[in-house]
Amino acid sequence: MIQIPRGTQDILPKDSYKWQYIEDTLKNVCEKYNYQEIRTPIFESTDLFVRAVGDTTDIVNKEMYTFKDKGDRSMTLRPEGTAPVVRSYIENKMYGDPNQPIKVFYNQPMFRYERQQKGRYRQFVQFGVEAIGVEDPLIDVEILSMLMAFYESFGLKDLELHINSIGDFDSRKEYQKALQEHFRPKIDEFCDDCQSRIDTNPMRILDCKTDKNHPLMSTAPKITDYLNDESIEYYEKVKSQLDKIGIKYVEDPSLVRGLDYYTHTAFELMSTADGFGSITTLAGGGRYNGLVEMLDGPAETGIGFALSIERLLLAIEAESIEIENPHTLDLYVVTMGEESRDYASVLLSQLRQKGITADMDYKARGMRAQMRDADRKNAAYTIVIGDNELEEGKVNVKNMSTGEEVAYSFENLEEAIQ
């Protein structure tokens, strides 16, 4: 039997309404902040991710789904959303738009070949936002405000926002030197990945899951000790404004967001709900002041974040928040005989055109079985059409919650249901 690929999932009709509710809610928040949707291709040139994400990252080295197309070009199913958005920003010359910054959101499947675990899949849906074209602490605060608004709009309370500053490129360069000096004497005790990163991107060592308990991890230098005056001023403005608008946060000097393009503000949102699991991160992001130039664009800056819909669902479940199924069936038509089935088919077509959700039995089952089916489908009303009803031109409309029945002519049935 052909089965679903490992690391993927079917979202069945009994659950799809939850996804629709979540996506609609997130989009409504974006509208309040004046962010508009962008849609990029599901695959891009492999070089885009190698250059943007960094050739020292696990995403590029281990997790990408890469293939050759018929033109012998290397293509990759997108593993993340920021690089494609920036590519589109450059290619479509959005930097020339008088409305700056360019504020967009996306809601798209991503692909990473990683070990499947609770809330993590090889195909997952990422909802993200990007604001490109302005370097201002206030836009950083807007992004953080939107992140919190996303989760609070579902009633989630067990949340903890962690923030840090990676500083500008000069600060980051000095910090990387300090990390190299710290780790190099005992780098042979670390995994192969860390040993290769000591010269290329030592900040990635701090993200290592294999060596996270090594004694040198807890004594590693903190980025905040290497911030220059400009970076400190930027960071203090972000924190001051967060305080003014009442957003609580935890300063986390160990939070570095190791992707090559991050600068200044970095952040992650954690779930503190009991039973959520060992991996508590719900969303993460930060400012990227060199990414646009890295991809041959102008000297523009940006900031954004991304969240996993799958992990958001886990957080909602962990806090015992119910999402009601909005789907309702206004009318179920019970039929008795072939002539009544033919008539019901026409009647349903007419009612649906008037905006009434209606259904009938298509398996020619008995009356009791049809009534049970109507009950399972949570029909608000039912009618029974048989020879007598067809002859008299009227039916009894039954309220399924009260059991009350009222007779109506077929001509007045739409009005009755409305």
Image (cartoon, rainbow, N blue to C red):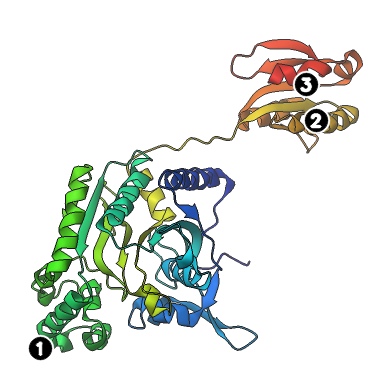
How far apart are labels 1 and 2 at the CA level? 79 Å
Q: In which quadrant is the C terminus drawn? A: top right
Residue 384: image tag? 3
Name the element at disc 3.
strand
- Badge 2 or badge 3: first in the primary sequence: 2
- Badge 1 or badge 2: first in the primary sequence: 1
Mark 1 — residue?
185
Q: Is residue 328 left or right of residue 323?
A: right
Q: Position of residue 278 (x, y in %)?
A: 27, 58
Closer to the observer: label 1 or label 3? Answer: 1
- Foreground residue among 375 and 354: 354
Few, some or many C-alpha atoms within 10 Å of disc 3 (few <14, some 14-19, many ≥20)?
A: some
Few, some or many C-alpha atoms within 10 Å of disc 1 (few <14, some 14-19, many ≥20)?
A: few
Q: Are marks 1 and 2 in contact (CB under 8 Å)?
A: no
Name the element at disc 1.
helix
Image point (78%, 31%), residue name: 348
Q: Position of residue 116 (x, y in %)?
A: 41, 66
